[in-house]
């Protein structure tokens, strides 16, 4: 059975989101601020895990990558040289009656969908936010909030090259906030005006760029699959020539089947030498690369750039939606009871282990607290002793906790605890002394239910 989430079910996800603390509307007590969102206690952990998984796979596990954390505010000339001042705009129309604004590309008819009013002629609307630097609000002090993290990498190309002595091909990656004054934000955290990007600029010798584009497309596509996105909900789409950004020679989008349709998660573009060349010309600094390996021909050249550029918020949303499931609840007497479960990858789940004493009995608490202290040093762990064990399992299922560890009265005698697996609901008994290693093994190998079957597992209800 496909586990694709129908659009109507977004309501359930939104309600879960608010109830359990994944995402809240920003400034909600003041009525909210359009299309801006705050990540709650669980959402922030999920998002941090997504970023950590990206950083590990793209930076730490590769010899040809290094990281960077550049400032959001940059010299105004950056955005002139990059072409954003001139080109980073959407065609906008405004309804003459109700003054609603739309991207003309999003419209099907030529009348306002809200009030059937007539539109103004389209005009180009630059998406960059402006702000002032310093105490005097003069144009000279006007700066932009970066609309992409990429430019922080290009302007640091020579710094990184000189400080790391990297040789081509190599790349620089960073994660950070970006801002776009989107005309039509929407679909929850999918399109917002403030968001996070995780971007790589991978510098290669011209002529090898097409091959590297293919390599990165495959690498990034596989990453989403390896963290649990189901293959039927992921696809690649190549840009048509008239869709390409002003800097791109070729581009593929990795798209996810969101409840509202297929939409972009990440773009992998061939940016050629556009940015380094433009910044070199505008700044007067030499941003070429000296290639000792060239025997015949030009040793100095501008590298080409392959750019896998993903959205942290979109990836987080996709992993979350894709993991959502409603299953028949075996712990309930009524036949139609459902168990809501997030089948999140063990490394993405906001809480990795929940420590559940079988009851609030005073004899159990000290032992349970002791095991909790051991676990929280190693994993993101939650302690929950409120209500029945069955309810607590369901609460953890609903937020995607892969493992629940139960301390019961036998634990006081045999120094063993029960690990319960979120997906299979199987339970196994394990000595406390082996608990951390056993959990680590399960988490690292994505394995579930690989302990010894419990002789008398506590009931899942
Ligand atoms: N440096 C290239 C670049 O910025 P992009 O396709 O405009 O390319 C890259 O953006 C990624 O950033 C997108 O694939 C998307 O995941 C994310 N993104 C872009 N605009 C966004 C928005 N308004 N809200 C949330 N994420 C956004």
Image (spheres, rainbow, N blue to C red):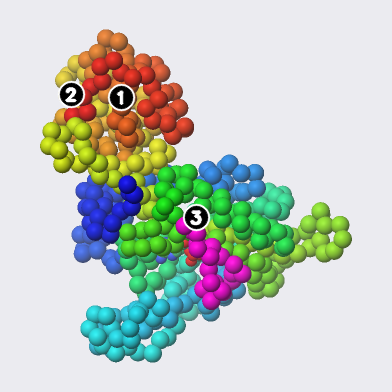
- State the residue at coordinates (41%, 48%): 230
Q: Circle 1 sits in a helix, a strand or a loop, which is it?
A: strand
Q: What stretch of residues is rendered in magenta?
A: 235-254
Q: Nearer the viewer, residue 188 or 380?
A: 188
Is residue 153 visible to the viewer in this orientation of the structure? Answer: no
Please rate how many residues cluster around mark 3, counting C-alpha atoms within 10 Å: few if below 14, some from 14 to 19, many from 20.
many
Q: Which mark is residue 359?
A: 2
Direction from residue 77 to residue 460 in the image, left or right: left
- State the residue at coordinates (24%, 33%): 393
**Up-down relation of residue 149 to residue 53 (above or below):** below
**Up-down relation of residue 370 to residue 315 (above or below):** above
The residue that mark 1 highlights is: 427
Q: CA distance from mark 3 to mark 2?
A: 44 Å
Give the mark count.
3
Is residue 358 visible to the viewer in this orientation of the structure? Answer: yes
Numbered disc in front, either 3 or 1? 1
């Amino acid at each position: 059975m496909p586990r694709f989430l129908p659009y109507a079910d977004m309501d359930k996800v939104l309600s879960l989101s608010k109830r359990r603390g994944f995402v809240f509307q920003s400034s909600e007590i003041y009525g909210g601020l359009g299309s801006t969102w705050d990540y709650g206690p669980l959402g922030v952990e999920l998002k941090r895990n997504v970023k950590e998984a990206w950083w590990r796979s793209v930076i730490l596990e590769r010899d040809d990558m290094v990281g960077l954390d550049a400032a959001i505010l940059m010299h105004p000339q950056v955005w002139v040289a990059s072409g954003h001042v001139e080109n980073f705009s959407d065609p906008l129309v405004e309804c003459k009656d109700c003054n609603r604004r739309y991207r003309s590309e999003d419209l099907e008819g030529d009348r306002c969908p809200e009030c059937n009013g007539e539109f103004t002629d389209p005009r180009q609307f630059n998406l960059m936010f402006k702000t002032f630097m310093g105490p005097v609000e003069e144009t000279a002090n006007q700066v932009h909030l970066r609309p992409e993290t990429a430019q922080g990498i290009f302007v640091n190309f020579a710094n990184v090259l000189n400080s790391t002595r990297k040789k081509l091909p190599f790349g620089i990656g960073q994660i950070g906030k970006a801002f776009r004054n989107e005309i039509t934000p929407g679909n929850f955290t999918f399109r917002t005006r403030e968001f996070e990007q995780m971007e790589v600029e991978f510098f290669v010798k011209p002529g090898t760029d097409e091959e590297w584009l293919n390599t990165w497309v495959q690498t990034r596509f596989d990453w989403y699959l390896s963290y649990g996105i189901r293959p039927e909900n992921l696809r690649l789409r190549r840009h048509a020539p008239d869709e390409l950004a002003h800097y791109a020679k070729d581009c593929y989008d990795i798209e996810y089947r969101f409840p509202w349709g297929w939409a972009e998660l990440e773009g992998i573009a061939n940016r050629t030498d556009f940015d380094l060349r433009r910044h070199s010309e505008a700044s007067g600094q030499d941003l070429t690369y000296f290639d000792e390996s060239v025997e015949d021909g030009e040793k100095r050249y501008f590298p080409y750039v392959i750019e896998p550029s993903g959205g942290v918020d979109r990836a987080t949303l996709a992993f979350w939606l894709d993991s959502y499931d409603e299953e028949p609840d075996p712990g309930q007497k009524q036949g139609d009871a459902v168990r809501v479960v997030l089948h999140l990858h063990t490394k993405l789940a906001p809480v990795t282990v929940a420590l559940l004493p079988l009851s609030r009995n005073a004899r159990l608490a000290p032992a349970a607290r002791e095991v909790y202290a051991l676990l929280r040093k190693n994993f993101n762990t939650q302690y929950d002793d409120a209500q029945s064990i069955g309810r607590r399992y369901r609460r953890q299922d609903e937020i995607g906790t892969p493992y629940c560890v139960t301390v019961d009265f036998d634990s006081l005698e045999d120094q063993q605890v029960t690990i319960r697996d979120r997906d299979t609901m199987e339970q196994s008994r394990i000595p406390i002394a082996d608990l951390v290693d056993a959990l680590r093994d399960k988490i690292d190998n994505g394995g579930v239910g690989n302990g010894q079957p419990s002789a008398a597992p506590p009931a899942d209800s």
